[in-house]
Image (spheres, rainbow, N blue to C red):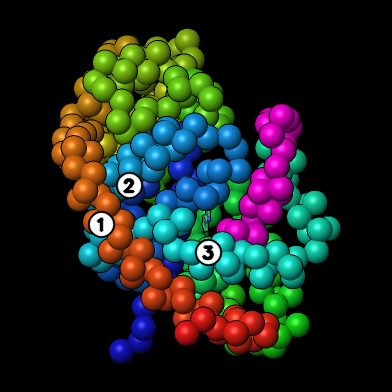
């Protein structure tokens, strides 16, 4: 038997999970959890790089966790945990920080963007953020990391850091991670600006449907999605990106081909499609909402699952950190 490859994925606990995440999740998780050893974590430490109201951060961490579970991520088949619960992340991060030249961090475009956006809070954590991310990945000897465009540069830096470590201390401590480019499901675009991806950290909440939006909100957002002024319902992402995006969502949620949708709306207006899509979305998310609400009623249960996840993750993280301590000349704690 060959061991399964390890996939690791983290999500910063900011914003709201969206319909785009839902679609990515349903198309991927079931299959991934069979074929790979999967770790998912809530990057609550990364969230601290921008100002967070303490209560909101805590509530959102529970909420994200419950949303992942409600979406069908199975805590038995995967390792799901909060980053801050496994102290090895910050410990390894420090060691890697001492190996990373400033010049490499200065190149990070996300730091430049974020420090312009959060002008009043350009803290050192925002700057060293990608080193913590490298620690997240390297602790678990991840083979693959699914990353969006915005995180590619950070993954590259992580690979550079493996090189810095090898040069100084020799090979064999960390696995060199690769970007996971699997079929990530359909690409869902912003509802108001279909040239951008639907993003969980979008400032304008009209741009996305959140997984926990109520029916009224979902309807309102879908009905007010930006579309062109034509009336014929046909799939044409080039000339009708807004309509085509709605059709993509429709086809995934309703399990229909574009041709079937076009046929069903022959002679009808965009408005008809929007009304039906809103209803379909509300129906689709209903069981997710129910499961989510149930989970959120019982924090003790969530705490218990978080503890179990952290225990599973810690065992693996500790192995790597002990090896690192030995290599760099720190005495491993016994
Ligand atoms: N920085 C990632 C994001 O904002 C989240 C993240 C933190 C992550 N650590 C990671 C993703 C490690 C993959 C691997 O999306």
Answer with the quarter of the image where residue 168 lies: bottom right
Local crowd size for mark 1, using a 10 Å CA cut-off: few (<14), some (14–19), many (≥20): some
Q: Is residue 171 above or below residue 73?
A: below
Circle number at residue 12: none
Residue 286: x and y in percent read 18, 32
The answer to whether residue 63 shows anywhere in this view is yes
Q: Is residue 275 or residue 41 the one in the foreground?
A: 41
At numbered mark 3, what does the secondary structure look like: helix, strand or loop? helix
Which residues, given as a range, are shown in magenta?
A: 115-133
Circle number at residue 89: 3
Residue drawn at x 55%, y 83% as measured from the top left: 332
CB contact under 8 Å: marks 2 and 1: yes
Residue behind mark 1: 305
Residue behind mark 2: 65
Quarter holding the N terminus is bottom left
Residue drawn at x 56%, y 43% as measured from the top left: 48
Nearest to N terminus: mark 3 or mark 1: 3
């Amino acid at each position: 038997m060959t061991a399964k490859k390890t996939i690791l994925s983290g999500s910063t606990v900011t914003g709201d999970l969206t319909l785009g995440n839902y679609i990515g999740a349903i198309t991927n998780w079931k299959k991934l959890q069979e074929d790979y050893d999967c770790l998912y974590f809530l990057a609550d430490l990364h969230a601290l790089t921008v100002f967070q109201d303490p209560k909101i951060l805590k509530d959102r961490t529970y909420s994200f966790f419950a949303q992942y579970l409600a979406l069908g991520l199975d805590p038995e088949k995967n390792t799901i945990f909060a980053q801050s619960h496994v102290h090895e992340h910050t410990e390894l991060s420090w060691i890697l920080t001492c190996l990373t030249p400033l010049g490499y961090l200065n190149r990070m475009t996300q730091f430049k963007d974020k420090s312009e956006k959060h002008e009043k809070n350009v803290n050192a954590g925002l700057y060293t953020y990608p080193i913590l991310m490298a620690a997240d990945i390297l602790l678990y000897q991840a083979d693959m990391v699914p990353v969006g465009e915005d995180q590619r540069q950070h993954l590259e830096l992580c690979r550079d850091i493996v090189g810095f470590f090898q040069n100084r201390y020799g090979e064999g401590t960390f696995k060199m991670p690769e970007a996971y480019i699997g079929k990530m499901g359909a690409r869902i675009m912003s509802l108001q600006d279909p040239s951008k991806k639907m993003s969980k950290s979008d400032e304008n909440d009209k741009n996305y449907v959140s997984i926990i939006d109520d029916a009224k909100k979902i309807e309102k957002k879908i009905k007010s999605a930006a579309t062109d002024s034509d009336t014929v319902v046909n799939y044409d992402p080039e000339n009708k990106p807004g309509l085509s995006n709605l059709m993509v969502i429709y086809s995934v949620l309703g399990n229909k081909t574009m041709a079937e949708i076009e046929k069903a709306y022959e002679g009808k207006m965009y408005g008809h499609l929007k009304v039906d899509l809103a209803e379909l979305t509300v129906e689709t998310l209903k069981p997710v909402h129910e499961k989510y609400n149930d989970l959120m009623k019982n924090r003790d249960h969530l705490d218990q699952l978080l503890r179990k996840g952290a225990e599973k993750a810690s065992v693996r993280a500790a192995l790597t950190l002990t090896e690192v301590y030995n290599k760099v000349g720190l005495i491993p704690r016994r």
